[in-house]
Image (cartoon, rainbow, N blue to C red):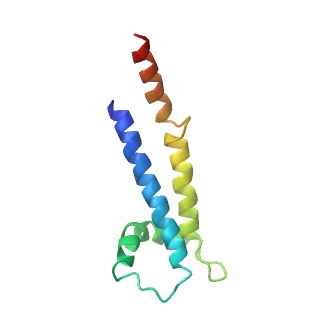
Amino acid sequence: MNYAAIAGQGLGILLALMTVLFIFRIILTWYPQVELTKWPWKLIALPTEPLLIPLRKLVPPIGGVDLAPILWVFICTFLREILIGQQGLITMPVGCSRATVKLE
């Protein structure tokens, strides 16, 4: 296994984890009484809030609905598909190098 394959798997795990965390943030927006500064909610807020703050400046809440976590789910899913999907930018070169090794 080469470095590109390891990096691809690590990136895939990171993007999947961030997608799950942003989905939890979407669910937590339905419960405004939840304090994100207390455990276990702090585990969800710490990695996501630095990414949500700049996006909230660009896309403010519409009708009381925070669209920033929804957009981040879309961004993470899109990046995961483009980079490490079946025909991703990282997956394709790794797959090609595996095929040439098997032929030799």
The structure residue drawn at horizontal position 43% and vertical position 58%, both measured from the top left corner, is: 17
Residue placed farthest to the right in the image?
63
The location of residue 25, given as percent across then percent down, is 49, 72
Position above or below: 49 against 101:
below
Label total for image: 0
Quarter occupied by residue 35: bottom left
Position above or below: 98 against 87:
above
Judge by depth and name the residue closer to the eye, 57 or 84. Answer: 84
Judge by depth and name the residue closer to the eye, 70 or 98. Answer: 98
The location of residue 60, given as percent across then percent down, is 59, 75
Position above or below: 67 against 3:
below
The location of residue 94, given as percent across then percent down, is 43, 29
The structure residue drawn at horizontal position 67% and vertical position 82%, both measured from the top left corner, is: 63
Image quadrant occupied by the N terminus: top left
Image quadrant occupied by the C terminus: top left
The structure residue drawn at horizontal position 53% and vertical position 68%, both measured from the top left corner, is: 69
